[in-house]
Amino acid sequence: MPRDASIKKVLVIGSGPIIIGQAAEFDYAGTQACRALREEGISVVLINSNPATIMTDTEIADRVYIEPLNVEFAERVIARERPDGILPTLGGQTGLNLATQLAEAGIVDKYGARLLGTPLKSIRKAEDRHEFRELMREIGEPVPESWIVEEESQLDEPLKSGIWPLIVRPAYTLGGTGGGIAYNEAELREITRRGLSLSMHHQVMIERYLAGWKEVEYEVMRDANDTAITVCNMENFDPMGVHTGDSIVIAPSQTLSDKEYQMLRTASLKIIRALGIEGGCNVQLSLSPHSFDYYVIEVNPRVSRSSALASKATGYPIARVAAKIAVGLHLEEIDNAVTRKTLACFEPALDYCVVKIPRWPFDKFNVADRRISTQMKATGEVMAIDRAFEPALHKAIRSLEVGIYGLQSKASSKMSDVEIEEAIRIPNDERLWAITEALRRGVMVEEIHSLSAIDPWFLRKLKGMVELETEIKSQSSAILAASEAEETPPADVVSLLTRAKRAGFPDRSLSDLTGAVELQIRKLRKRLGIVPVYKIVDTCAAEFEAETPYFYSCYDSENEQ
Amino acid sequence: MKALLALEDGTIFEGQSLGAPGRTYGEVVFNTGMTGYQEILTDPSYAGQIVSLTYPLIGNYGINADDFESRRVQVEGFVVREAADIPSNWRSERSLHAFLKDRRIVGIQGIDTRALTRALRVKGVMMGAISTEETPEQLVARIRSAPAYGGTDLNRQVTAERAYHWPPYTKQLGDIAAAEQRALELPALDQVPRVALLDCGVKYNIVRSLSALGCEVTVYPCTASADEILSRNPDGIMLSPGPGDPATLGYVVDTVKRLIGKKPIMGVCLGNQILGYAFGSKTYKLKFGHRGSNHPVKDLNTGKVYITSQNHGYAVDPDGLKDGMEVAHLNLNDGTVEGLKHKELPIFSIQYHPEASPGPTDSSYMFETFVRTLTAN
């Protein structure tokens, strides 16, 4: 299908002010969508109340309205502009809510417009807990078993299920107080009794407890021709229990075999098809670390923070493609803007590792509870790309701008062993450095795994980095001497420096570890030719030539800049 | 231990040894799949080739007992950016390095695999060699004096030693090994669709997929005659994938020509190329092939697009096709032929891998189509 020629003017709804739990992802997506629509010769009208956005620049849209995002003002804009279509799926929840209200109030029909992209009923199906569970049952995709219980006698069903452990969550209590995890009948009865008495509505929700399971996300896209693709999958460093927005995230997944990767990919595509989404969608799944068992946790039927991350992690412009799909184009009719030779209808192949770390606002609020769990607290995030996990993690840490530039933080180095254990067991913003500090103090990977349930693959990578730190320290006099001498240092020093840089150790860390002057270290490695090269993010692992100048640095051989 | 990878054009990469020390030689190709290294290592279509993976972190989930696609490691050599020392996955039984060492496969790690991919993309695939023993000069000299890819009959090396049955609903590796051992002791089953599979380098998952759909599969060596293949009166014939240059497989093409019109036929990968030859066409070598899990293919009959798993270095030339055979699938990246279909006879083939392993399972419906053809006839 070529693009729908009846669409000549489109109203794009922005997302208003940025709130906690959001970065600037909706401005990013909205801007990309406006450009994509204009590429198709469509006139773009934009409404948004947030002045600090790129999309409100008059070069991005044809007409910009800085107005409150409510029905009253939106109707006036629609009446005046008479758009053929309204694109609501790029402005986050705000844009979506406003579009729903406009449709329900009959305003969309009244002015002869229509909503573009994913139909509202698909969005409702994805967002309504009950409808979503029903749909998953219909298509045979597993969701965690759960029961609403209002009196103790209703415990028969969860007990009959034979599922253990179960998590009990009292409804409407602050911060989930009164809940808990039950491993047997006696515990379940006791926690339920306590929960019911604490709940204002005398209600608890009981659900299969997936603690320690892997959390994996798939960013998928679908067009009106039912072609569906995966843009990216991502694995959370923090297992289930931490909101994905508060998790360290790695793309692509690292610990999934092809069978597991494909099983979850197939499930994600089945879900986007069943929902009838036309555009992008994020599917969150939970995978057992001990079997092929998995559960579908949640679906975000629109562009989101995750899709912004996936776009930048792969080079695949999800919002651009979603906007083109919304005006009738099929994936095979949209070009791959990176290669210009291939199409948007493919799945990006990465030849690097991406690490995202959330940025929390705790430093601004001294009293804030620094624990993280199922409610997102981060206000932003940083992403880093490199050829391996270690340097990508190192770069992401340095991007955080929290005064930490490596594997050591002042806070965790001052903690007692007991405090370290606590900081590993209960997720919080310091956990990464608590883990490296524990490794430094000789705690075994197995023990950290049993405290945190973080996959041993990640923990062993951290252990390798701490061991390299120790090795650098043990060679400090040789490195110090080399940094002060003119002649070429011994081969083992050169090899160690190369390995350190390949693992992402900044010169500043090398200086701290060896006592050498940072600038002297830099001079030394420049003299030795240990310098970074730049490689291209090209969506296709170099299979095709890329035209987009999107680079990352790494200590590898060939420079592509 | 230090290791070198050299290409025919004299390019040298220096890295560390992976797997067994020693020397190896083959056509150097790259695969862009991010998972599935165990399936790739054991896929017979990689016989004669040194495979480089573009994804840099390989071996993370180890080697397990189930993800074998044939009895042995088939690649001549293996190239990765970084091999995991200690894998992490519930099915993992050993590390990539220990496995390769045990199977005496020579590999190299620590090289700039992206630079290698770019070199192959620009110049096309080349012959190459990995060595822990030779100097760069010796290595390049050895490559230049060795035969080119396709000069030897790789299919006879990888095919089944003798015909054997694979009963319906057989999935586990143990069952498969037992089936291969039992050879033809079992009588042919009457109640289930029976498929004769001509093995030019079959992947287990093709047989598993047919078996999962309730078929009994009889696997024949690639040298089997048409009469042998028809002897047990199968309901349909499957032509397997396999390594090598299809232009050199005249004997297989002749066998297949004798099967046309007798039974429904489905070809996969090399099977697609063999059918191309049987219907008057030829193949040509692609500059750097299609190897990965992300190739978009359009089914021209339905207009639907699928993401497919691919592994081939040759493509069917659509111009020579005759006697009712026509192009049915196209690759959306470069427009090459990805599938054929006969206008009247129940004969069709695809250049990509419906059995996945590794890669997406989007096109497993092709097996269902084939099995429906068997029961309809």
Image (cartoon, coloured by chain):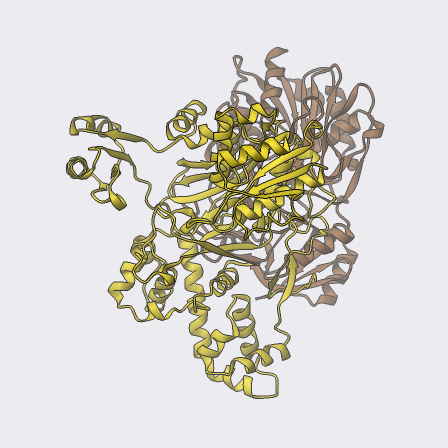
Residue at figure coordinates x 53%, y 54% from the top left: A354
Q: Quadrant of residue B106?
A: bottom right
Instruction: Find residue B88 and report its horizontal and vertical position in percent.
Output: 43, 51
Residue A392 appears in the figure: yes
Residue B269 appears in the figure: no
Chain B is shown in which shade?
A: brown
Q: Nearer the viewer, residue A539 or B146?
A: A539
Instruction: Find residue B145 and report its horizontal and vertical position in percent.
Output: 79, 57
Q: Quadrant of residue B1?
A: bottom right
Vertical side of B298 occupied by B141: above or below:
below
Instruction: Find residue A345 and report its horizontal and vertical position in percent.
Output: 65, 37
Q: Nearer the viewer, residue A469 or A19?
A: A19
Vertical side of B186 occupied by B47: above or below:
below
Chain A is shown in which shade?
A: yellow
Residue at figure coordinates x 39%, y 60% from the top left: A432
Residue at figure coordinates x 76%, y 57% from the top left: B8
Q: Nearer the viewer, residue A500 or A313?
A: A313
Could you tell me which quadrant the N terminus of chain A lies in? top right
